[in-house]
Amino acid sequence: MEFGRLDPIDGDGAGHTLRERLVSTLRRAILEAALPPGTRLVETKLAERLGVSRGPLREAIFQLADEGLIEQIPFRGTFVQAFSLVDVEQVYSFRVLLESFAFRLVWEKRTPEFFRMLDLRHRALAYAVYAGDQQQAIRSELDLHGLAYESSGHRPLVDTWHRLRGRLHFYLSLHQLAHGRAAALPDAHDDYVAFAKGDDLAAMLREVEQHMLRGLDTLRTFAAARAPVDGAG
């Protein structure tokens, strides 16, 4: 598949390593559709296009695969993550079920340490948001949501969360791009944390659903515009 503007990496890294500059360049190209969903990434051609060696490029691809932006399929190759409106809807509805189940399991197991970790992760997210570090903010947001899973004592649930996390990172990146901002709003998780520290499980479950669906209409519109074939990928 042909792709759009993708300039060679500038030799002046301004303190950043070549791998970091490659990650930033490729991430932007994916999110801005210079590398459209489903594009096959051939290392030799991409390295030539960017004017770099394959070693640091491969490291950058591995990092972006961890972020859910790139998919490495055995015996087929490396591709920009595909997405569709159907995929967005299914992932979000599945996440509501998973997180609700996690809170049902953990509710009676919450300890002072759980509340301390909840506050720590909430503060880490706030720091990343105020610093304008989009990718760190996304990682911190997923860390915050991950606490209920990690504390549930349910190994298959935790494994499922880890497998889903990369895809969610991809969608959260798109979510911020759709809203035209660098990171989540500073107070976006205040209610979520308050309910998670409260005494009303039913209220927490309602907040989980509302939190997941909040802003989803914007992402639906964005995904529909970016995915010409509904249900592909």
Image (cartoon, rainbow, N blue to C red):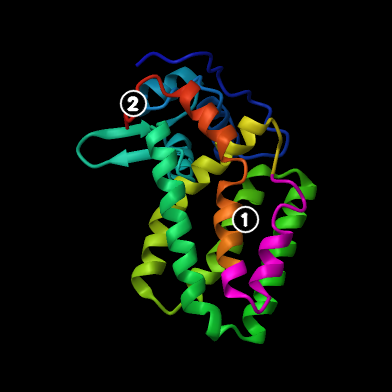
Looking at this view, is 93 or 8 the one in front? 93
> Could you give the CA–CA distance between mark 2 and mark 1, rounded to whole angstroms?
29 Å
Looking at this view, is 123 or 145 the one in front? 145
Examine the rendering and report whether any part of residue 139 can be seen: no
Q: Amino acid at mark 1?
A: Glu
Q: Amino acid at mark 2?
A: Arg
Element at label 1: helix
Residue pictured at 48% horizontal, 56% vertical = 96
The boundaries of the magenta stretch are 184-203
Q: Is residue 39 above or below residue 198?
A: above
Answer left or right for 5 relative to 132.
Answer: left
Residue pictured at 58% horizontal, 74% vertical = 201
Looking at this view, is 60 or 86 the one in front? 86
**x, y percentage for residue 200?**
63, 75
Q: Which picture quadrant has residue 110?
A: bottom right
Residue named by callout 1: 141
Which numbered disc, 2 or 1, marks the residue that appears first in the sequence? 2
Residue pictured at 44% horizontal, 15% vertical = 3
Residue named by callout 2: 40
Residue pictured at 68% horizontal, 76% vertical = 198
Q: Is residue 107 above or below residue 217?
A: below
Q: Is residue 25 above or below residue 167?
A: above
Instruction: Sort mark 2 into few (<14), some (14-19) or many (20+) by Cα contacts within 10 Å.
Output: many
Q: Which picture quadrant has residue 85?
A: top left
**x, y percentage for residue 55?**
43, 38
Examine the rendering and report whether any part of residue 46 can be seen: yes
Answer left or right for 195 relative to 225.
Answer: right
> Which residue, as the protein is rendered here, is positioned at the far right?
130
Element at label 2: loop
User: In the rendered view of the protein, which quadrant contains the N terminus?
Assistant: top left
- Check residue 191 for magenta coloring: yes
